[in-house]
Image: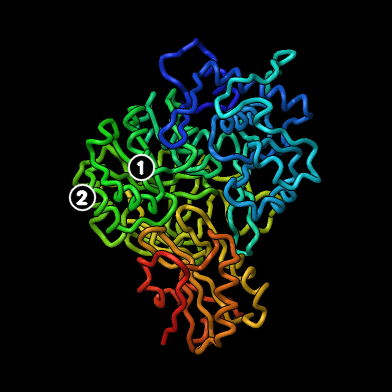
Amino acid sequence: MIFEDVPTLLARLGRGSDRATPALTFYRGRTLVGQLFRQELRERVERAAATLQRLGVGTGDRVAIGAPNGLDVPVWLLAIWRIGAVAVPLNATSSADWRHILDHAGVRGLVAAPDLAGAVPTTALEFVRSFDEGFGPVPTAPLPAPTAPLPTTSALGDAAAIILYTSGTTGLPKGVTLSQRNLLANAWGMARNFGLVGATQLAVLPLYHAHALGFGLMTALTTGGHLVFTERFDPLAWAEVARAQAVEYASLTPNLLPLLLQTHLQRADVPSLRALLVSSAPLAADVARRFEAETAVPLVHGWGLSEYTNFACCTSPFSDDGDRRALLYGDELPSVGPPLAGTEVSVRDEAGEPRGDGDRGELCVRGPSRMLSYFRDPAATRQALYGDWLRTGDQGLFRMHGGRPHFYVTGRLKEIIIRGGEKYSPVAVENRLLAELPELVGRVAIVGFPHTLQGEEIGAYVEIDLVPDGLETRLLGAIERLPVELRPRVVLHGAQPIPRTHTGKVQRRHLLPLFDAFKEHRGRTQLQRVN
């Protein structure tokens, strides 16, 4: 069922007093922290929404949320949407872009975990509310009850619901603006694909990430399901939590599969699990083959992007097992499957003309999950959208299978690096290095190269044949001072010029063969000369 908007969804949550199955269950490691049943969840959302209204928040106002996963996060997200306001999630693990996001989004206030509320720049905010004023780790202290019933909002389906800031090619993150209808339509498409009706799902990725927000929170809420979610991914506790809660579907990014293999996971450890969805970063066919061979846990593969709310294509857990395996690792690249219900995907050439079976081009998407715009960036919006099609910046192709086109992602036309499911701008990393090493201007190029664990890893090429000892020390020192998630793990240098277009733009893809030997590299940054 597709709901018109979030208030309509919440109205359904309030029907009855079902305490047989929780709506939300939260774990920290192996510890069950707390649960919320449907009526309790709706009541807490209503109280939080009333609090926001008393703080002066109205339709269209932006409110930032800063917190790791916890029961507070979905309550405040739903409260913001209940009154037609717009949520602006902050990455709780990295504060590098917080000031830019708060300023660019023009947020009125912040609700945050206690330890983050004091760390966020607040000079331009009208209010800062810590979660411990309403809920603790277990939400027992109630927010004040509404002094009067919240007003019935007009239809909010087309209203902006959330701005997801994602790395841009210029180095500054862009705000992907999604409507309530976008969120609900994408959840419906994934629910159709997985046959979700009252199912129990497990999410270990952060709720500020489109993946867990979409296939997790929204799919569970819209199908009467039960979302089990954790503070973070703990490979040693993952199977125990899934078994204790009789989880039927779970999702991960590809870089987490090897960590589960290290725990010697077996199908018998998760007897209720029907399938494990893998998406949000490149998946190597060899990794998928090895995981299934060693665990016997069936994998499902999906693809999408924040600009399409999350998922656009996905293989089916109900496919014939031979077909599923052939699509997953019967070729050099795993298929991401056919489009979801209601979604169209097309492969187009540089002139925008459709390509045929097996021909490579840019993957373009249209449907009800397409973003409204990049927030306050009409130029970027015009570049990404033509007509009702979204240009994804991903290169791919389709092959007919069972009478339907099944798609494959072969590379990226845009330069964003997707490492472990998180997006990073190569320009942003270059700028951070050059701020300390200005003598390397024009001689450093950051790339994302294929990596078996992370999907892509960050590498650097320096156009210097022999690096002087002093510069080598300063370069490695500058890398060590970068936030850990931005550090190049491999730094190559040599006499080969950085390839550029006639306008001087770096052609990063031409540097990728230099990094072929480092697909398994782990540990500290490695500096090496190449011929």
* Image point (41%, 49%), residue name: 253
Relative placement, left or right, of 315 versus 411 is left
User: Which amino acid, mark 2?
Assistant: Ala
Q: Give the residue number, with chain letter if any, for mark 1.
A: 236
Q: Nearer the viewer, residue 237 or 86?
A: 237
Q: What's the CA distance linking mark 1 and mark 2?
A: 20 Å
Residue closest to the eye, 482 or 295: 482
Closer to the eye: label 1 or 2: 1
Amino acid under disc 1? Leu
Residue at left offset 44%, top offset 84%: 529
Disc marking residue 250: none
Q: SS at mark 2?
A: helix
Task: Depth check: give the residue in front, 322 or 293.
Answer: 293
Image coordinates for residue 265, horizontal then vertical, percent: 27, 43
Crowd around label 1: few <14 · some 14–19 · many ≥20 (10 Å): some
Check the image and name the residue furthest to the top: 16
Residue 102 visible here? yes
Q: Is residue 188 left or right of residue 166?
A: left
Q: Nearer the viewer, residue 484 or 303?
A: 484
Q: Is residue 345 left or right of residue 131?
A: left
Image quadrant occupied by the N terminus: top left
Above or below residue 373? Residue 40 is above
Quadrant containing the C terminus is: bottom left
Q: Which residue is mark 2?
A: 293
> Percent x, y for residue 274?
28, 35
Which of the two labelled residues, at mark 1 and mark 2, occupies the earlier sequence position? 1
- Residue 226, image quadrant: top left
On the image, the x and y values in percent for residue 412 come to 46, 63
